[in-house]
């Protein structure tokens, strides 16, 4: 079920661009109230909230409706795709009834810092309107009780297609993007098969000549709990988990899916990125030492030294 919630009724300044917050929920009763309150506390006020619920059986709907009654909000109810979190976000993003200048993905269990939208919109307003651009940020890691337990890594290497092919550096729960990026994502016919909606966004935007920005400020409190669809990625346990995924072939399956999807829009890629994609594909399909040569020629990289070593080992053992 989807519930569209209109929040701001103030006069719209032409410089005060409208933001559509796209919130996907499933069994979210435990934390969703904190998240919606963090929307209401935003210093940037010109936003509209769209809640898409994927057939929750708990009190998620009732909690959202409580906010609707409290603030005199309108609602429209629809049916969700019931096909995993990535397809859920992509389906909501493609909804033609949602009109805005910028779009912000949101998870149900996080808490946005008060200036999250303000910082994002200020950056987006400086970017070319017709170019696909995405703002993302670091996150403050908190436990189920909102106590700080860490911070997400600061990725210092360039955010390019060479990186996006083999690593996702921006959490969807931090992303705010313009209409051009939305249209580009919506043009990907196989998008609903994506491993992750945010990873796909990183790939298509950088691949097609857009701009992907990862801000060094943590603007989302990323709650870590037992039911996370995706958890923090900088702990020792997370790194070991990535190694296990390489060994058991999960990473290879992900790359196959990603390549299939990106190849469907290959003609939209910059020429140099078409070559990178071709070399990376050969690094997956050739025999023996040629795989490493093609991987090197592709120039793909992950953000850390240890991560890059794992990438080349995975390539050598045919696990990419």
Image (cartoon, grey):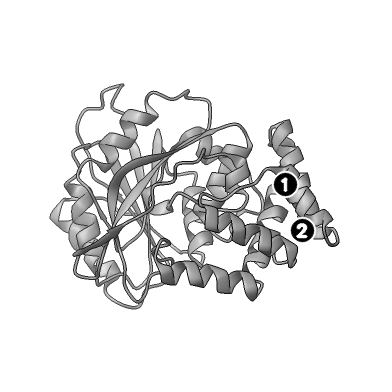
Q: At x 53% / y 58%, what residue is drawn?
A: 306
Residue 286 point in image, percent of width and height:
84, 58
155 sits left or right of 222 in the view: right
Q: Is residue 186 visible?
A: no
Q: Residues within 10 Å of mark 1 (few under 14, many from 20)?
A: some
Q: Which mark is residue 296?
A: 1
Residue 75 point in image, percent of width and height:
30, 54
Of marks 2 and 1, which one's residue comes earlier in the chain?
Answer: 2
- Residue with the most extreme right position: 287
What secondary structure is marked by label 1?
helix
Residue 141 point in image, percent of width and height:
29, 60
Q: At x 19% / y 58%, what residue is drawn?
A: 67
Q: At x 72% / y 44%, what residue is drawn?
A: 298
Residue 24 point in image, percent of width and height:
39, 60
Q: Which mark is residue 279?
A: none
13 sits left or right of 91 in the view: left
182 sits left or right of 25 in the view: right
| Residue under pointer 2 | 284
Q: Is residue 6 visible?
A: yes
Q: Quadrant of residue 122?
A: top left
Q: At x 28% / y 27%, what residue is drawn?
A: 16
Q: Quadrant of residue 246?
A: bottom right
Q: Residues within 10 Å of mark 2 (few under 14, many from 20)?
A: many
**229 or 309, which is in the foreground?**
309
Q: Is residue 47 above or below residue 25?
A: above
181 sits left or right of 285 in the view: left
Q: Is residue 34 above or below residue 198?
A: below
């Amino acid at each position: 079920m989807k519930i569209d919630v209109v929040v701001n009724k103030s006069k719209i300044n032409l410089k005060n661009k409208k933001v559509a917050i796209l919130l996907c929920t499933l069994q979210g009763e435990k934390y969703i109230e904190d998240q919606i309150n963090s929307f209401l506390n935003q210093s940037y006020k010109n936003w509209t909230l769209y809640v898409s619920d994927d057939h929750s059986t708990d009190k998620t709907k009732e909690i959202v409706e409580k906010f609707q009654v409290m603030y005199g909000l309108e609602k429209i109810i629809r049916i969700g795709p019931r096909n995993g979190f990535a397809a859920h976000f992509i389906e909501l993003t493609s909804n033609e009834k949602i009109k805005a200048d910028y779009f912000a993905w949101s998870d149900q269990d996080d808490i946005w810092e008060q200036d999250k939208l303000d910082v994002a919109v200020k950056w987006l307003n400086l970017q070319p309107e017709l170019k696909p651009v995405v703002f993302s940020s670091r996150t403050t890691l908190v436990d189920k009780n909102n106590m700080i337990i860490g911070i997400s890594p600061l990725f210092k290497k360039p955010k390019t297609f060479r990186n996006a092919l083999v690593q996702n550096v921006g959490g969807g729960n931090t992303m705010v993007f313009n209409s051009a990026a939305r249209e580009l994502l919506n043009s990907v016919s196989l998008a609903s098969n994506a491993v992750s909606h945010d990873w796909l966004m990183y790939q298509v935007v950088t691949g097609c000549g857009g701009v992907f920005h990862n801000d060094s400020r943590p603007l989302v409190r990323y709650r870590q709990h037992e039911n996370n669809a995706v958890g923090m990625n900088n702990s020792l346990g997370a790194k070991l988990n990535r190694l296990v995924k390489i060994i058991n072939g999960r990473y290879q399956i992900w790359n196959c899916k990603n390549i299939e999807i990106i190849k469907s829009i290959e003609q939209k890629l910059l020429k140099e990125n078409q070559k990178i994609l071709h070399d990376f594909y050969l690094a997956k399909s050739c025999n023996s030492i040629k795989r490493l040569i093609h991987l090197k020629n592709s120039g793909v990289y992950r953000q850390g030294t240890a991560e890059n070593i794992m990438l080349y080992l995975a390539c050598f053992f045919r696990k990419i």
